[in-house]
Every structure is written in structure tokens, then in C-alpha cells.
Image (cartoon, rainbow, N blue to C red):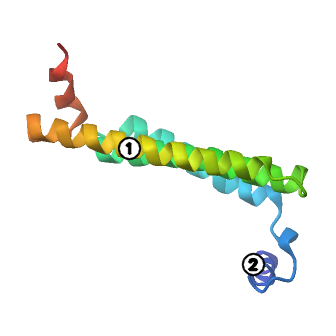
């Protein structure tokens, strides 16, 4: 644990960008991904489901950036994929929030179970 804290402060002070091993980034990404999947399955609120989907997307974007940094440190393709993913996630969030607002106007609820009544 002390080594991890020392690596963190070296990273913050700009001593070495490779102070944090790739495995730690992948652990964070995995936790984010499975938290998003669990939230998507368990949650009953549409906004919570949307946040869970965003967690999954952010985990994928973190993987793009990490693998680009460690496999091809001089190239920026992974960073561009991450920026593209962030733009797609922003557009997806805007559309999803608009849909959630319309669902709330019609049903006065944002529960996933009540959305089933919209089947035409």
C-alpha cells in the first residue's frame, strides 16, 4: 500500500508518467464496467439506468486510453477513440434525457416497470 501511495505522489508531482502500472487502470476499468452492468440490471429508475450505461461506456473509453498509452505511447489513436466515445456518450445522454422527460410527462414516473405500459 505504501508503494502505491508513493507511486501516486510521484505521478502527481510529474516525476514519472509510468508510475501507475497498467494493471491498476484495468482494475478500475473492470470495477466501473461491472458496476455499470449491475446497475443496469438491478435499478428500477430510468435515470439510474442511464448512469449505469454511462459507467459502462466510460470503462470502455478508459481501456482505449490505457492500452494506447502502454502499447503505442507515441501515437494517439486510443485517445481519439476515447474522445469520439465521449462525444457519442454525450449525444446519447441528451437523447435519453429527452426521452425520460417525455416519459415523465406522460406517466408521472420514471420507473422502468411503468414504461412497459407504453407498448403500442
Quarter occupied by the N terminus? bottom right
Report crowding for label 1: few under 14, some 14 to 19, many 20 or more residues within 10 A (C-alpha). some
Name the foreground residue: 45 vs 100: 100
Is label 2 in a helix, a strand or a loop? helix
Q: Which label sits on residue 50?
A: 1
Contact? badges 1 and 2 (CB < 8 Å): no
Residue 103: give x, y in percent of width and height.
18, 36
Residue 52: give x, y in percent of width and height.
44, 45
Residue 74: give x, y in percent of width and height.
90, 57
Who's the residue at 29% across and 41% down the image?
46
Figure quadrant of residue 98: top left
Residue 62, placed above or below residue 34: below
Asked if residue 47 lies left or right of residue 16, the reply is left
Question: In the rendered image, which residue does mark 2 sit on?
Answer: 8
Q: Is any part of residue 30 visible from this angle?
A: no
Label 1, label 2: how many angstroms apart (C-alpha)? 31 Å
Who's the residue at 20% across and 28% down the image?
115
Quarter occupied by the C terminus? top left
Looking at the image, is mark 1 or mark 2 nearer the viewer?
Answer: 1
Asked if residue 28 lies left or right of residue 97, the reply is right
Residue 40, placed above or below residue 83: above
Asked if residue 79 lies left or right of residue 88, the reply is right
Residue 16: give x, y in percent of width and height.
87, 77
Name the foreground residue: 40 vs 97: 97
Amino acid at each position: 500500500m505504501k508503494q502505491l501511495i508513493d507511486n501516486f505522489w510521484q505521478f502527481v508531482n510529474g516525476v514519472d508518467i509510468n508510475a501507475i502500472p497498467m494493471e491498476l487502470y484495468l482494475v478500475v476499468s473492470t470495477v466501473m464496467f461491472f458496476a455499470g452492468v449491475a446497475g443496469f440490471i438491478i435499478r428500477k429508475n430510468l435515470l439510474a439506468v442511464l448512469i449505469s450505461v454511462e459507467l459502462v461506456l466510460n470503462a470502455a473509453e478508459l481501456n482505449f486510453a490505457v492500452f494506447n498509452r502502454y502499447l503505442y505511447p507515441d501515437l494517439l489513436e486510443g485517445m481519439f477513440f476515447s474522445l469520439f466515445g465521449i462525444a457519442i456518450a454525450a449525444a446519447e445522454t441528451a437523447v435519453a434525457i429527452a426521452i425520460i422527460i417525455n416519459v415523465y410527462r406522460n406517466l408521472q414516473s420514471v420507473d422502468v416497470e411503468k414504461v412497459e405500459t407504453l407498448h403500442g
